[in-house]
Structure formats: structure tokens, C-alpha cells
Amino acid sequence: MNQHSTQASLPLAGLLVLDFSQFLAGPSAALRLADLGAEVIKIERPDGGDLCRSLVVADQRVDQDSALFHTINRGKKSFAADLKQPDDLARVKALVTQADVMIHNFRPGVMDRIGLDAQTVMALNPRIVYAAVTGYGEHGPWRDKPGQDLLVQSLSGLAWLTGNAGEHGGGAPVPTGVSVIDVITGAHLVQGILAALLRRGVSGQGGQVDVSLLESAMDLQFEPFTAFLNSDRTQPARSVENHANVHTAAPYGIYQTRDGFIAIAMTPMDRLAELIASPALAAQAGDAGTWFSNRDALKQTLQAHLVQQDSAHWLAALEPAGVWCADVLTWPQLTEHPAFTALDMTQTIHSPDGQAMQTTRCPIRLDSQRLTNSRGAPRLGADTETIAQTFGLPQLRTTTS
């Protein structure tokens, strides 16, 4: 933790979380609980562990695993167990009896076959919060489909909200550039877990929390999807020019300037035309009732004018006038900016072999303090014996030849 906070001072200190999940959505939820003070133990199969250990992005590895694995599993411990082996399963069930939270993201039915379904687990430990992530829920024709971020972006309609429409209203769907569904689902899982823990503090009883990638994807789209539900239910049209939102009028979008790009949000078009000194735009923007219906033509005229000057020129004219606008920064530009320095959003973590890597910190601040943890992800099974001794788990039987 940072110099102003210790693990014991954090609000979830003393809670034990068992993380059976893999990849991003479940592990990101367990990570946030760890950031807030919980002790998180990853339960991993001995032969390879979490598949994210080998999910290498940007060709980056740290110690024996992918850098991505360290990013999403920092500060956790690893307990190796083959859940198909009775002795290992018995040890895990002994841990379950002492845990406060259990997280998994197996497909529907898998935990039932293993013997760690919600009913069984809550019979072993009535105070536990049993939290599960699925791709598409427990029922329905998609229940057994792979729950993966890009697939859910595509199935949920999210990909059709982004990207210019094209000259004839078509235009390819564009997914987001980050695993946004995984991350928002993990956040929803944390919200449900914390609510169940709060209720347990009153009733003494645990509970079951279920989220799915598809449900979180629909919740993420609540604004445009609600408009769709209360309309004639035709697919909303994207802008052909400088598209940013299916339901907003001009000028909402990103525009090229002479040396880069600027974003302009909601602002009166006639006032904008005056501020940038564009007679052509002023002639088109007189009727506020056309700022949505005629948005492509308005955006085209605006774009033709903005490209004539640098971004700094336009920002100097628009920001003092109260127009909601911003530079469009690359990561090199962002990380060099004093605003990013003031945010102090990165931290250095260290792998088991001492390698250092930079990543983001917990975005939550408590008592005005930033939360950091310098410990990287554990090696597979590194904490198995220590955990077994600490929690008094049954000894594994040894076989003799």
C-alpha cells in the first residue's frame, strides 16, 4: 500500500476471497477486492493455472507469465488444486468453510459437476457470498456460448454504436479498443458482492451474486437502448460524418485539425459558428431544429473549417467561451501532460523474481489516499503449502509404489 495506508487499515481487511476465475472479468473483481484490503487466494489447476498466465499481449512477459496476468492478479496468492481429485477438492472445501467470498466464471453446469455449486457451497458455509460470472446467464439458447468480450460486444449491439455510418448509411460495426465488457462486468460483480456483505453484517447470512457479460453490456448501453425501447424499434442511425453518438445532434464528435484532432461535445451550433468565425456554418445552423436531422451536413461544414487551423488555435477560442471541447491525446502525449502527473495513476509492481513493471493503480481513493500494492501476481501454486498450514487444511495422502 502507499505510505499513508496499510493493509490492516483498508475496509475489507480480514476478509478472505477465493478466486476460481480466469482471464479478466472475474479476476478484475477479485483484484478490486484485494485493492480494498481483502486477502485473495487464486485457486488454480496445477497444470498451467489461470489461462491468462499464457495470454501474452504486446509480446510482454514478466517472470514466468504474461504481463497481463500480473496486471490483473497483482497482490493475490496462488493455491494449486485439481478440483477433479477428491483430496484436492476436500482441501478446497475446507478453505470454502473459512472464506467470506467465492468467485468463479465457469460455464453454467461446471461447478455443479465438480460439487462446488452455490447450494453445496452455501450449505458448507452459510455466511459465504457466492459470486459467479457467466457469458449470457444460466438459461437460454446462448448459455453455453463462449463468454468473451468481443463476442459479447457483437451480440449485444454495442459494436453498431461506434464508427461512421458510411456514405449510404452502412459502414462496418466497430468494437471498442479495450475489453470494456469484461471490466464493467467485474465492476458490477464487486457492487453485488459488497451489497451482499453489507446485508450479511445485519442478517449473518451470505448470499448469491450472479452477473453476466451480456447483462452488463446491455446495462452499459442503457442510454441509447432505452431510447430504442421507447421508439419504433428501428436501429438508430450513426452519423456519416464524425460520428460519436447515435442520438446526439451536431456538433458532437471528433474533428481533424491541421495538426491533430479535437473533440467537441454538446454546444449550440449557431454559437459555435460565431466563435470559429465560419459564415458557411452560420448559414446552415440558424434553425436549432435541424441540428440533429441535418447533422451530417453541419459536421461536414464544421470539419472543413476546423482543419484549416491547429488544435491549440481552436481550443484557445472555444474553451474560454465555455464550449465543452478537448484535445484528442495519444498515450505519449497524455503521459507527458502535467494533468496525468497530478493524477498519479500508475504504480510499479514486482514479480516473484524481482522484475519490475509499471501498471495502473486502483482508481479508488479512500480517506483521500491512493491505494497501491507493489506485489505482482504469484507463481502458480507458490502459496499452496503456506495456505494449507495457515488454514489447517487436510494433508494430501502420499502414494507408495
Image: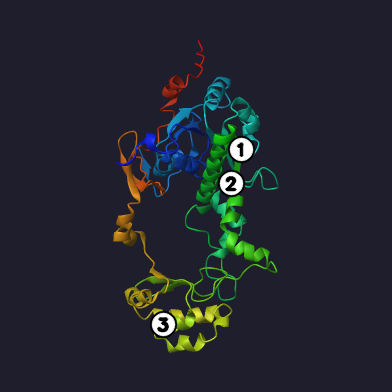
Which is nearer the eye, 363 or 26? Answer: 363
| Residue under label 3 | 305
Of circles 3 and 2, the one toward us is 3
Which is nearer the eye, 353 or 229? Answer: 229
x, y percent for residue 273: 44, 83
Q: Earlier in the sequence, mark 1 or mark 2?
A: 2
| Residue under label 1 | 208
User: In whole angstroms, how far apart are the C-alphas of marks 1 and 3?
Assistant: 56 Å
Query: Residue placed farthest to the top in the image?
Result: 401
x, y percent for residue 63: 35, 37
User: In whole angstroms, how far apart are the C-alphas of marks 1 and 2?
Assistant: 20 Å
Q: Quadrant of residue 198?
A: top right
Where, quadrant-wise, is the N terminus in this rendering? top left
Q: Circle 1 — which element?
A: strand
**Visible in this render: residue 394?**
yes
Residue name at image x 51 percent, y 13 percent: 399
Q: Amino acid at mark 1?
A: Gln
